[in-house]
Structure formats: structure tokens, C-alpha cells
Image: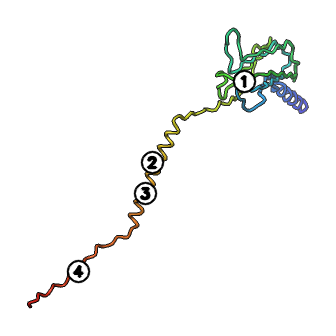
């Protein structure tokens, strides 16, 4: 009886471990720099890992950058990597890279945003990374143009000189010793000659 109980406990634990093992299809993607300036080149790295019990056939990987737009007669800011291969089962891993250039025009002024990465498969449909693929584009410096600085500086200089003269006069007058007016003693009364 004890042996039967131990055997059933061992089977239950091993079945629980088998059921707990995740069967997942992972897509990871990241860029090679923390921040890009307009006109910079970069590389997007993509890794696919298949932990499922069956191999997964991948048709292609589509990439849409934040500056994706229709310009003149074509789409810009997107890329497609033709894969057309199966990712091996139970831990099969494949890696790809895609190079890109951040545009120099107004489409690149985006700050922090994400690149859209989609992996098209036959068994699973469309898969993508669990976390957003962030890309940061530095904003161009803002140039300030100051006009009429010669007139402004001349006016400022005149005001400073006038204020300095007024301040000097005030200091001079406040430190000057005040003198009480002298009283002139009246002359002694004159004696009349006939007295």
C-alpha cells in the first residue's frame, strides 16, 4: 500500500512538472544605440526562440519604424525580412539584423517611441515582442536669432552710465559733512561820542 502511494505521488509530481513547462514562441528585438541623431545609421537586432513542442514555420518579419510614411511614390521607413524557414522545436533560436537610417527631415523629430516588429508564422499567426522596441531620436538644437543687439547694447550702456553718475552724486552728497551756518555775532553797540 505504501509503495502504491509513493508511486502515485511520484507520477503526480512528474506530470505536474510536465504540465508546468511553458510552450512558448518568443520574439526579442532591440536597437544598437541608446539614442540617435537625425541622419544616424543603426541596427535592429531580432531573435526568435521556439520553446514549443513543434517547429514553427516563419514566412517573414515586417518592421515599421516611427518615421514610416508614403513619400512621392513609395513607402519609406519600413522593411521586410524574408525568412521562409522553420524554427526548430524545443529551444530553436534564429537571429536577424536590419539596418536603418534615421531621416534628416521632419519625420525624425519623434522623441522616444517604438518600432513595430511583426513575425508572420503559419501555425501562430502574427507574433511580436512582449515589450516595445524603443528608439530615441534626439531633437535638433533650437537656434535663437537675436536682432537689433547693437541698439540694445548701446541703450543699456547709456542707462548704466547715467545710473552710475546719479549714484556717485548721491554718495557724494550723503557723505559730505553738513556745517551749521555760522552766526555772525553782531558788532558791539557803538558808543555814541557824546555820551
Disc 1: which residue: 102
Ranked by sequence position, the earlier of labels 4 and 3 is 3
Of 40 and 167, the residue lying toward us: 167
Circle 3 residues within 10 Å: few <14, some 14–19, many ≥20: few
Q: Is mark 4 on a helix, strand or loop?
A: loop
Disc 3: which residue: 167
* CA–CA distance in space, label 4 to label 3: 39 Å
Disc 4: which residue: 185
* CA–CA distance in space, label 4 to label 2: 49 Å
Circle 1 residues within 10 Å: few <14, some 14–19, many ≥20: many
Picture quadrant of residue 10 = top right
Circle 4 residues within 10 Å: few <14, some 14–19, many ≥20: few
Of 49 and 106, the residue lying toward us: 106
Q: Is mark 3 on a helix, strand or loop?
A: helix
* CA–CA distance in space, label 2 to label 3: 12 Å
Disc 2: which residue: 159
Q: Residue 145 in the image: x percent, y percent? A: 56, 33
The answer to whether the residue labelled 2 contacts the one labelled 3, judged by CB atoms less than 8 Å apart, is no
Ranked by sequence position, the earlier of labels 4 and 2 is 2
Of 94 and 69, the residue lying toward us: 69
Q: Residue 69 in the image: x percent, y percent? A: 67, 15
Ranked by sequence position, the earlier of labels 3 and 1 is 1
Amino acid at each position: 500500500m505504501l509503495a502504491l502511494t509513493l508511486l502515485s505521488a511520484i507520477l503526480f509530481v512528474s506530470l505536474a512538472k510536465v504540465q508546468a513547462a511553458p510552450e512558448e514562441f518568443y520574439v526579442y528585438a532591440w536597437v544598437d544605440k541608446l539614442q540617435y541623431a537625425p541622419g544616424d545609421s543603426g541596427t535592429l537586432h531580432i531573435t526568435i526562440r521556439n520553446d514549443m513542442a513543434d517547429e514553427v514555420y516563419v514566412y517573414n518579419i515586417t518592421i515599421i519604424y516611427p518615421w514610416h510614411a508614403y513619400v512621392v511614390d513609395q513607402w519609406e521607413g519600413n522593411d521586410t525580412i524574408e525568412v521562409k524557414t522553420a524554427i526548430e522545436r524545443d529551444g530553436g533560436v534564429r537571429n536577424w539584423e536590419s539596418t536603418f537610417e534615421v531621416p534628416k527631415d521632419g519625420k525624425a523629430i519623434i522623441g522616444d517611441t517604438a518600432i513595430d516588429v511583426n513575425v508572420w508564422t503559419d501555425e501562430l499567426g502574427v507574433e511580436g515582442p512582449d515589450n516595445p522596441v524603443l528608439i530615441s531620436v534626439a531633437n535638433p538644437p533650437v537656434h535663437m536669432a537675436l536682432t537689433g543687439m547693437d541698439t540694445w547694447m548701446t541703450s543699456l550702456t547709456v542707462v548704466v552710465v547715467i545710473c552710475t553718475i546719479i549714484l556717485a552724486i548721491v554718495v557724494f552728497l550723503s557723505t559730505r559733512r553738513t556745517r551749521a551756518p555760522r552766526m555772525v555775532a553782531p558788532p558791539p553797540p557803538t558808543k555814541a561820542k557824546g555820551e
